[in-house]
Image (cartoon, grey):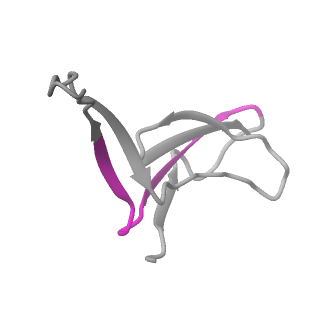
């Protein structure tokens, strides 16, 4: 299994107490495998249902954020490749 990769950046280098901090995280995993499962049902007479598809991800990723002050970081968005978290300085 490949090791996930991650890069992160804050929207500023210094903050005053009470300022909003935005953390942007780009992440990936070379062996994550998105795929689609398609299901069709056929009866004894050969009649077929309409196909139904279900998206699946093998080896999904989860992003967590902690800092050494115990601050709470809240997820603002997450595309599956880029996540944005917010906290208060």
Pinpoint residue 35: horizontal percent, then vertical percent: 30, 50
Q: Which residues are magenta?
A: 18-37
Pinpoint residue 55: horizontal percent, then vertical percent: 35, 39
4 relative position to 85: left or right: left
35 relative position to 81: left or right: left
Residue located 58% across and 52% down the image: 63
Q: Is residue 5 above or below residue 42?
A: below
- Quadrant assignment, res 45: top left
- Quadrant assignment, res 5: bottom left
- Quadrant assignment, res 58: bottom left
Q: Is residue 67 magenta?
A: no
42 vs 80, nearest the viewer: 42
Number of disc labels: 0
Please identify the dominant SS of the magenta region. strand
Q: Is residue 58 visible?
A: yes
9 relative position to 32: left or right: right
9 relative position to 86: left or right: left
58 vs 84, nearest the viewer: 58
Q: Is residue 74 above or below residue 33?
A: above
Q: Is residue 27 magenta?
A: yes
Pinpoint residue 61: horizontal percent, then vertical percent: 51, 55
State the quadrant of the C terminus. Answer: top right
Most extreme residue toward the left is 46
Residue located 20% across and 22% down the image: 50
Residue located 33% across and 52% down the image: 34
20 vs 6, nearest the viewer: 6
Most extreme residue toward the front is 44
Pinpoint residue 8: horizontal percent, then vertical percent: 50, 58
Q: Is residue 55 above or below residue 2?
A: above
Q: Is residue 81 visible?
A: no
19 vs 1, nearest the viewer: 1
């Amino acid at each position: 299994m490949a090791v996930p990769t991650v890069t992160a950046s804050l929207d500023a280098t210094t903050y005053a107490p009470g300022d909003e901090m935005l953390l942007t995280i780009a992440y990936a995993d070379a062996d994550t495998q998105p795929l689609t499962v398609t299901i069709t049902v056929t009866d004894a007479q050969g009649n077929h249902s309409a196909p139904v598809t279900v998206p699946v991800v093998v080896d999904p990723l989860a992003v967590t954020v902690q800092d050494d002050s115990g601050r709470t970081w809240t997820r603002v968005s997450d595309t599956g490749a880029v996540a944005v978290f917010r906290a208060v300085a």
